[in-house]
Image (cartoon, helix red, strand yellow):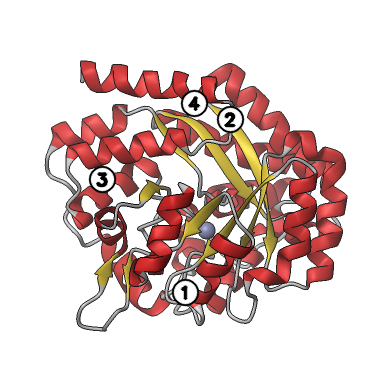
Amino acid sequence: MKGLAALGGSLALGRHAGAVAPVTDPTLAKFIHGLPKSEYHVHLEGTLEAEMKFALAKRNGMNLPFADVAAMKASYQYHDLPSFLAIYYDGMKVLQKEPDFYDLAYAYLAKAASQNVIYAEMFFDPQEHLKRGVTMADVIGGITRARRDAESKLGIRSQLILCFVRDLSAESAMATLDAALPFKADLVGVGLDSDEAGNPPEKFREHFAKARANGLKVTAHCDVDQTDTLKNIRTVLTDLKVDRIDHGGNIVQSTELVAIAKERGIYFTVCPTFSGTLRRTEKMPVDVVRAMLDAGLKVTISSDDPAYMGSEYIDGVLIRAVDRSRLSKAELIAMTRYGFEAAWLPEADKAAMIARLDAYVKSA
Ligand SMILES: [Zn+2]
């Protein structure tokens, strides 16, 4: 989400994505599936599938205004960021208790593991849940329990990134951070998502500083084609000095910023399903992944909010990215490697994951 920048153009791309012929090379699709992968840009609430919404609503004694799953999915029609966010935030109201967050996180991790994701850093938006009276202990507790079970039962390792909902107040974000700090051992970082318009990254300067002082990493969404896009990218790169950037495709429009990102070794988590194009002109959109790779940037690919994007998880997203951005196999492998280098893990752990990748590539 929240990656929904350029929604007009990107939405068209996303909606048309179903009509785009998938990669027809079954050998490459099989290779992609088998690749040991990571994922850094997935909003847990964006993995809340319609089927689970009905199950959780039933468990929590809630009525949903849809006859069935098909009717709910048919309602996922949006034409701009606010209309998407309305559907997105409304949908997560079924998340009420600790087991709900457990089920949500476990379902995502099981799906990811089935597509050979071996490591994920997942976003969640506690502010939206606290607003409804859910406790931070239930939110983080349920997700953490799922993370542990998924690691022991499915072999997928994961960590958790708390996102500030940037269109809510700075005070609300600080209260959320304060409520989360007692659980900081279960978090790896903080991030910034939701509506960027009028909510520049410097609004969260103190929050990022406090998070860092508590040992957390910092990342931020820089959605595509936003007002002040390049200014915001500059702010996170040179002022707030984030550890990673989510999306950030417009950086290719500034050679100076590209140079700074390369100098700092910044990794970008790009979600081509929605923010796949820059609207440089209506007639000549710029392919974000292609342009960033050609600029020499370290791009990783993720699925963002798959439940709202045709239930397409990482394998499908990668297959489409290969097709759309004309990725070579070597580029695909390089991006997968970036995906492990970017992990907020000890170097030895990253090296072990990269060794798994190398072994797979050698044997495939
Ligand atoms: Zn996002």
Which amino acid type is shown beneath numbered disc 4? Lys
The Cα atoms of the two marked residues, 4 and 1, are separated by 31 Å
The residue at the point 83 percent across, 61 percent down is 174
Q: CA distance from mark 1 to mark 2?
A: 29 Å
Q: Say if 131 sits above or below 7 in the image.
A: above
Viewer-closest of 17 and 37: 37
- The residue that label 2 is drawn on is 345
Q: Which residue is mark 1?
A: 230
Which amino acid type corresponds to the residue marked 2 in the rendered image? Answer: Leu
Q: SS for tag 4?
A: helix
Q: Is mark 1 within 8 Å of ligand 1?
A: no
Name the disc covering residue 319, or none: 3
Q: Are marks 1 and 2 in contact (CB under 8 Å)?
A: no
Which secondary structure lies at badge 1?
A: helix
- Tell me what residue is drawn at x 67 percent, y 45 percent: 189
Mark 2 residue's CB less than 8 Å from ligand 1: no
Q: CA distance from mark 1 to mark 3?
A: 29 Å
Q: Is residue 23 left or right of residue 145?
A: left
Q: Earlier in the sequence, mark 4 or mark 2?
A: 2
Please tell me in which quadrant of the rendered image residue 108 appears.
Answer: top right
Q: Is residue 97 something that shows in the picture?
A: no
